[in-house]
Image (cartoon, rainbow, N blue to C red):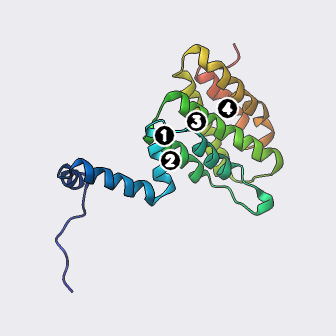
Amino acid sequence: MTTSNKKKPTWTDLKRNLADLDQHALLGLVQDLYAASKENKVFLHARFGMGDDVLEPYKATISRWVCPDVMRNQDYSVSKAKKAISDYKKAVGHSEGLAELSVLYCESCRDFLGFCSVDDEGFFNALVRMFEQALKCIRQLDAGQQEQYLERLDSVHYEADDWGWGVGEDMDDLMAEYGFGKQ
């Protein structure tokens, strides 16, 4: 058996090939990528601000994966919900959009925990990390924009003591650390 001395292709290699394409060929390539997957469509729509609400597909993904329909035997997946936020960040990354998605993640977890008991430390750790991410995003916004997100996040924070795993205390500490705690 012979071994190949060829290295794996890199972005630099691809970029070199793309530079050789004319506009028509490049548009054809983008069209093929657009048709190849729903994720590519969502990315391109978000990148170019197409549609009424570019956040909607990301919101739907987050809600689906951290607040599943247990009556339909759906499971939750922290990683799939977090990936939606990461995908939005790569596509657009606006602070207000990131604040919206991270707060929605926390609200969806709250909603799920309101009707379903979860005994998964990883779920709660991810919730606390996302709560912190939401605070970071909110802090980057103008003061006038912050209030609506803080109110929504505070409603999650209010219920956190009932969940155990130290979630309420962690959220208290984070609110104080980011300057949003009770004065």
Q: Residues within 10 Å of mark 1 (few under 14, many from 20)?
A: many
Give above or below for 111 relative to 137.
below
Q: What's the CA distance linking mark 4 and mark 1?
A: 31 Å
Q: Residues within 10 Å of mark 2 (few under 14, many from 20)?
A: many
Q: Extreme bottom residue here?
A: 1
Q: Nearer the viewer, mark 1 or mark 3?
A: 3
Residue 171: which disc? Answer: 4
Give above or below for 9 relative to 139.
below
Residue receiving disc 2 = 42
- First reached walking from the N terminus: tag 4 or tag 1: 1
Q: Is residue 173 left or right of residue 159?
A: left
Residue 36 image offset from top left, x and y in percent: 44, 60
What amino acid type is highlighted by mark number 2?
Val
Identify the residue at image location x=70%, y=42%: 108
Q: What's the CA distance linking mark 2 and mark 3?
A: 13 Å
Residue receiving disc 3 = 52
Q: Secondary structure at mark 4?
A: helix
Residue 143 image offset from top left, x and y in percent: 58, 14
